[in-house]
Amino acid sequence: MAQRAIYPGSFDPPTFGHLDIAERASGLFDELIVAVGTNSDKQPFLSVAHRIESLTECMAGLKNVQVSSFDGLLVDFAEAQGCQVIVRGLRAVSDFEYEFRVAMANRRLRPGIETLFLMSRDEHSFLASSVVREVARLGGDTSSFVPPVVEAMVREASRARQAR
Amino acid sequence: MAQRAIYPGSFDPPTFGHLDIAERASGLFDELIVAVGTNSDKQPFLSVAHRIESLTECMAGLKNVQVSSFDGLLVDFAEAQGCQVIVRGLRAVSDFEYEFRVAMANRRLRPGIETLFLMSRDEHSFLASSVVREVARLGGDTSSFVPPVVEAMVREASRARQAR
Amino acid sequence: MAQRAIYPGSFDPPTFGHLDIAERASGLFDELIVAVGTNSDKQPFLSVAHRIESLTECMAGLKNVQVSSFDGLLVDFAEAQGCQVIVRGLRAVSDFEYEFRVAMANRRLRPGIETLFLMSRDEHSFLASSVVREVARLGGDTSSFVPPVVEAMVREASRARQAR
Amino acid sequence: MAQRAIYPGSFDPPTFGHLDIAERASGLFDELIVAVGTNSDKQPFLSVAHRIESLTECMAGLKNVQVSSFDGLLVDFAEAQGCQVIVRGLRAVSDFEYEFRVAMANRRLRPGIETLFLMSRDEHSFLASSVVREVARLGGDTSSFVPPVVEAMVREASRARQAR
Amino acid sequence: MAQRAIYPGSFDPPTFGHLDIAERASGLFDELIVAVGTNSDKQPFLSVAHRIESLTECMAGLKNVQVSSFDGLLVDFAEAQGCQVIVRGLRAVSDFEYEFRVAMANRRLRPGIETLFLMSRDEHSFLASSVVREVARLGGDTSSFVPPVVEAMVREASRARQAR
Amino acid sequence: MAQRAIYPGSFDPPTFGHLDIAERASGLFDELIVAVGTNSDKQPFLSVAHRIESLTECMAGLKNVQVSSFDGLLVDFAEAQGCQVIVRGLRAVSDFEYEFRVAMANRRLRPGIETLFLMSRDEHSFLASSVVREVARLGGDTSSFVPPVVEAMVREASRARQAR
């Protein structure tokens, strides 16, 4: 059975943790869509364009991965893309509860789509985009959290904010 | 001893989970006040009037339940209403911690008032108002999360937001 | 409505935390049965007789409380005693999960019986019978964990074990 | 890519929760092996033969599922069976931690094998084999936790224990 | 080895829990800096000046403690102050995860600086600045959460907000 | 102030996680005692002699560390050794709760002794002695969990068990 999976997230910014999940998921399914959710109420840190550009660059070596964005319900987008599987990474207890709430909702909305969880690698257990944003905001070095292409964007976004 | 209990919440919107807790609590106490807290700093999703109206309709069959609202400290309102017991539902670990912080504070403020927790029914373990608001915001179907009267209000509220 | 509640546990040994829950529960219901479960597979630390004796002495001032024991399913005993409500204390996350598993099972076995949870007082948040047993086993002073009558029994039980 | 997955467990006894995970996993992979681990130090409740027999009967309708047992390291068995994927169900926080410890160990032992987690259905959130064993031991009705074929075995196992 | 430690926080407002951690930490290290972080994006409840003033007054009896503020990365400030140790209090599960994320980030940013955690005293297990702010906002009495000097500031801050 | 700290544990067997905590703690205090608790009710996996021998070998490079064992209450041993500080590693939620129960008990038994927690390094977040014992029991390779000297002892212990 040819499996097409979707790995959704806000990726604001993408971290080494996200890239690890995407890479491992790409080895498990025939095709993987890394999908940037753009419909949050919150003001983003990186623009959608920057998030897509950096993810695309980071995923360049993985032939069965494509990067995309969506702005409605995830399950609608997944269905439209022919994905039966949603992939998410799990790090810690708070993730667990949030992820289960979302997975429960998605199952009620579209029972035929299944959510699969991958455990984050040990070294990414406590790595979160929110921490990266906070370090960047305070002028810290984010090179141990995100790949170089993202780091440059993060630095630029922080400077732009400061200037305002 | 004639027990009068209060079930406070923001109920924004009321979900099947809230209704279940209210119904079960109404079977345990002589009188139950379902009390909509209106003093949050946050901009509500449903108006207080809509929340009271929908709760009142949903509770219509329970003769010992009345729906009300309050805008100061919960323990002041509870005391003024002659309630010795606060009822809250518990779903998951994050609830647990938040609820315990609030219950601790309420006990210090008014030691004579006790907080009792009911466990959410299995099928509501991961059902949260925040998930309902998010699904509604994205145009999804909320009929498996909330009763029909609430669903109509939720749809209307989402449309009004979109229009802004 | 005259409410009869049951507060079950292994109480091996009873701690200040158990006594606090029992006392608070006795103020919420017309009658309260503190019920020592005797059917565990595990070798108990205190005998059932000692647990009942010490609980009875500690509860002596509460006129609407009686101490009892049971050895089958809790819900069967609760029903036989005319109790519609099971009371349990909650301290921490591990409690929470264990208690919810048991409450879920009890609800499926007897849907008409409701489990209510009381939050442990702050100073008992991390107090557990297992810790008391461990301290006693190593010859430590348990007077800050259990009332004097229990302390004497705990000391005696530890000595008897050592002698074996 | 033809995916072969393994769903390991002690299944002592199999519950509705296990069957749900197995059924959903069978829809996600080309082949699924439900594998009963037989090497625990603990005295089992149901014999391995009974666990295999009942799982086989329950899985009869799923053509791509086979039931098996193993008694060494899971990753050795998975590799010998040509499985790249281990499937596990997740219910609650304590599961989460235990499962992550095991998944971490399995990844270090065999980095090429990936563990995927499925979220338990709402109604199985607090259902555990240990609860079923306890209810059975006390003579309670386990029909809302396990399928009929398992229920009969559980009853028999409890009676045999009692007789000893 | 002469140890200099830093106890950072937003202390908005300082609670009895914060004071307890500071006092205990001051007994463990040669010098302790209680450092008010001023760089949050959020609108503070108490001004930095008020937070420093009240902490200074509360710490007056501890000769090896000084109160300070900082507005960049904590690890930069710690290093500039010659502190090898960051001290933090831990109360509950949600603290635990947040604190570990921050500690992980700080370790990656400055591997030579170590974070040490102290367990909050039982009676402060569920005491949080956010609860104090909420009680104050609703006109409640905060005297069981914060020392008198803080209470006066909290009352004043709430009145000023109301007036707006 | 010359600080003497104790790092107690069962170390059965010592893992890379234990060694990391010991090493980091040795950099924070003037002297560190790594203390093997020998009074557990449970049958140990490695003998106390083997645990002390391997810890001593692994700590050989750290001049301010000594390895010892104790068999009564930890706080009695700590006090006899002139230690004001107990050091423990924290990994996950279940650790957190267990550790807090023990720390609470130790504080009540000896208020002058303080427990400090160090966060486990990311790569040891899910590494537990129990997992090592289980892998060893099943004949797996434990070299990614424990240092070579421990691995040899673990292998020998597993063989001896098998032979029985």
Image (cartoon, coloured by chain):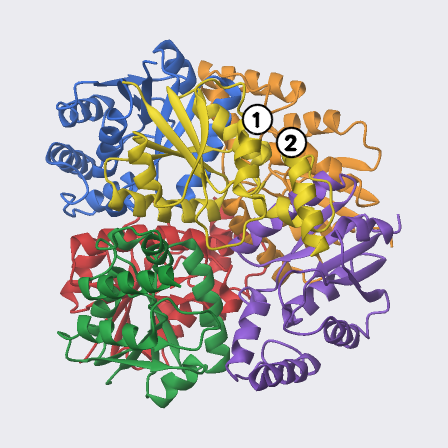
Chain colours: A green, B purple, C orange, D red, E yellow, F blue
Q: Considering the image in quadrants, where does the N terminus of chain E appear?
A: top left
Q: Relative to F58, does residue D148 appear above or below in the rendering?
A: below
Residue positioned 36% across, 22% down in the render: F39
Secondary element at image label 1: helix
Residue positioned 36% across, 28% down in the render: E5
* Discs 1 and 2 carry the same chain letter: yes
> Looking at numbered disc 1 in the image, what kind of residue is underneath it?
Glu
User: Which one is in front, B134 or C154?
Assistant: B134
> Looking at numbered disc 2 in the image, what kind of residue is underneath it?
Val
Percent x, y of residue C30: 84, 45
Residue C105 in sight in this render: yes
F83 left or right, relative to B148? left
Residue positioned 21% across, 22% down in the render: F52
Count residues near mark 2 (Cα–Cα under 10 Å), then give few for <14, some for 14-19, many for 20+.
Answer: some
Q: Considering the image in quadrants, where does the C terminus of chain E appear?
A: bottom right
Q: Relative to F24, does residue B158 appear above or below in the rendering?
A: below
Q: Chain of mark 2?
A: E
Percent x, y of residue A64: 18, 80
- Residue highlighted by disc 1: E57
Secondary element at image label 2: helix
D114 left or right, relative to C132? left
Percent x, y of residue F164: 20, 35
Q: Quadrant of residue E69?
A: top left
Residue placed furthest toward the front: A163
Count residues near mark 1 (Cα–Cα under 10 Å), then give few for <14, some for 14-19, many for 20+.
Answer: few
- Residue highlighted by disc 2: E149
Q: Chain of mark 1?
A: E
Number of marks in the rendered image: 2
Marked residue nearer the N-terminal end (1 or 2)? 1
Percent x, y of residue C162: 45, 16
Q: Quadrant of residue C37?
A: top right
User: Is the Cβ of the residue at disc 1 closer than 8 Å to that at disc 2?
Assistant: yes
